[in-house]
Amino acid sequence: MRSLILPLATLFASPAVAKSFDRPIPQAQSATAEFWYAMACIALIAAMIAVQQLVSRR
């Protein structure tokens, strides 16, 4: 059984069987996505300021 593993592994892993890689096409970002990204950035900055104030009090 072990003698069959290596030939089968090389057969199934050969480049002839592999599909070619198609690069994903980047999509334009919508205005709604930009708005929510801006809101997330502002929320992250507010959270970091809150943590800084909490830590500096101790």
Image (cartoon, rainbow, N blue to C red):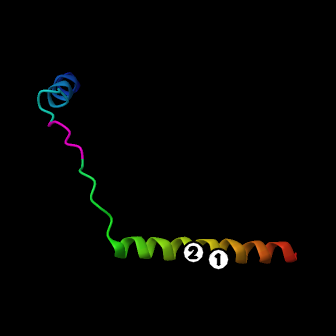
Quick check: is 4 in the magenta stretch?
Answer: no
55 shown above or below 9? below
Q: Residue at x 16, y 28 (%)?
A: 8
Label 2 crowd (10 A; few <14 / some 14-19 / many >=20): few
33 in relation to 19, above or below:
below
Classify mark 1: residues with Cα within 10 Å, few (<14), some (14-19) or many (20+).
few
Residue 23 in which image quadrant: top left
Location of residue 52 by image quarter = bottom right
Question: Which kind of residue does numbered mark 2 sit on?
Answer: Ile
Horizontal side of 29 relative to 49 (left or right) equals: left
Find numbered disc 1 in the image and state the secondary structure of the residue it sits on.
Answer: helix
Q: Which residue ends up furthest to the right in the rendered image?
A: 58
Given the current orientation, which residue lies at the most extreme front position?
31
Left or right of residue 10, residue 26 in this image? right
Pick the front one: 9 or 45: 45
Identify the residue at horizontal 27%, vertical 58% (top origin).
27
Residue, disc 2: 42
Identify whether 18 is placed above or below 43. Answer: above
Label 1 and label 2: CA atoms lie apart by: 6 Å
| Residue drawn where x is 20% and y is 29% of the image | 9
User: How far across and how far down the image is residue 49, in percent?
Assistant: 71, 74
* Residue 58 in the image: above or below residue 17: below
The one of 21 and 34 positioned closer to us in this rendering: 34
The image position of residue 55, as x and y in percent, is 80, 72
Provide the residue span drawn in magenta: 19-23
Please tell me the numbered disc located at residue 46.
1
What secondary structure is the magenta-colored segment mainly?
Answer: loop
Q: Position of residue 11 (x, y in %)?
A: 14, 26
Residue that lies at the very extreme toward the left in this rendered image: 17
Quick check: marks 1 and 2 in contact, CB under 8 Å? yes
Q: SS for tag 2?
A: helix
Type of amino acid under label 1 = Ala
